[in-house]
Amino acid sequence: MTQNIYFEPAWERTISDPDRKVILEKFYRLKEANVANDFITYLWHAYNHRQSLLTTILIHNWSGQAIDFENRLVHCLVGGEKIATEKFSIPCQVPAHTSMPWTFIFPKEHVRSSVDFSKCQLIVENNICRTLNDDKNEMHIE
């Protein structure tokens, strides 16, 4: 079955053209590489005006059934060291054979500061993500 990409309606309305392009490029590269064992792929991180850490990922559902993402513990690791942990839920299902971008927001108070994100990983409960840091993928949002 062919893997598709899905942008949740709020994403569809608000995503910038450059961000959409980056997401689609990484999605098609992963699709070509046929990495069907990965659950999430780290895309980039940023900080918002509250200095919360925003980590953008692709969630992959390679199975033939829709999946829920409810109250899942997510750890952010840099260089193998845990810098943040939060529980997250996504308000929609990830359809079968679909990858979907999402952003997790770690409040400033729960993030260790002054870290180099060039080797960032996210772990969702027992699922580890693929780290695709072609560059530092760092940007700041004001």
Image: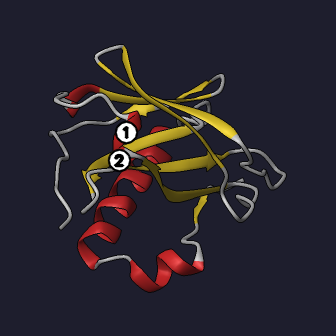
| SS class, disc 1 | helix
Crowding around mark 1 (Cα neighbors within 10 Å: few <14, some 14 to 19, many 20+) is: few
x%, y% of residue 113?
22, 31
Q: Nearer the viewer, residue 142 or 133?
A: 142
Q: Nearer the viewer, residue 32 or 49?
A: 49
Crowding around mark 2 (Cα neighbors within 10 Å: few <14, some 14 to 19, many 20+) is: many
x%, y% of residue 94?
70, 58
Q: Is residue 85 above or below residue 34?
A: above
Instruction: Tell me the amino acid under the disc marked 1.
Output: Glu
x%, y% of residue 67?
78, 51
Residue for point 16% across, 39% down: 136
Marks 1, 2: nearer the viewer: 1
CB contact under 8 Å: marks 1 and 2: no
Q: Nearer the viewer, residue 55 or 87?
A: 87
Q: Is residue 47 above or below residue 39?
A: below
Find residue 133 and report its image quarter. top left
The residue carrying mark 2 is: 43
Residue for point 20% across, 38% down: 134
For marks 1 and 2, give the CA distance: 23 Å
Instruction: Tell me the amino acid under the disc marked 2.
Output: Leu
For residue 109, the mark is: 1
Residue at the bottom extreme of this rendering: 13
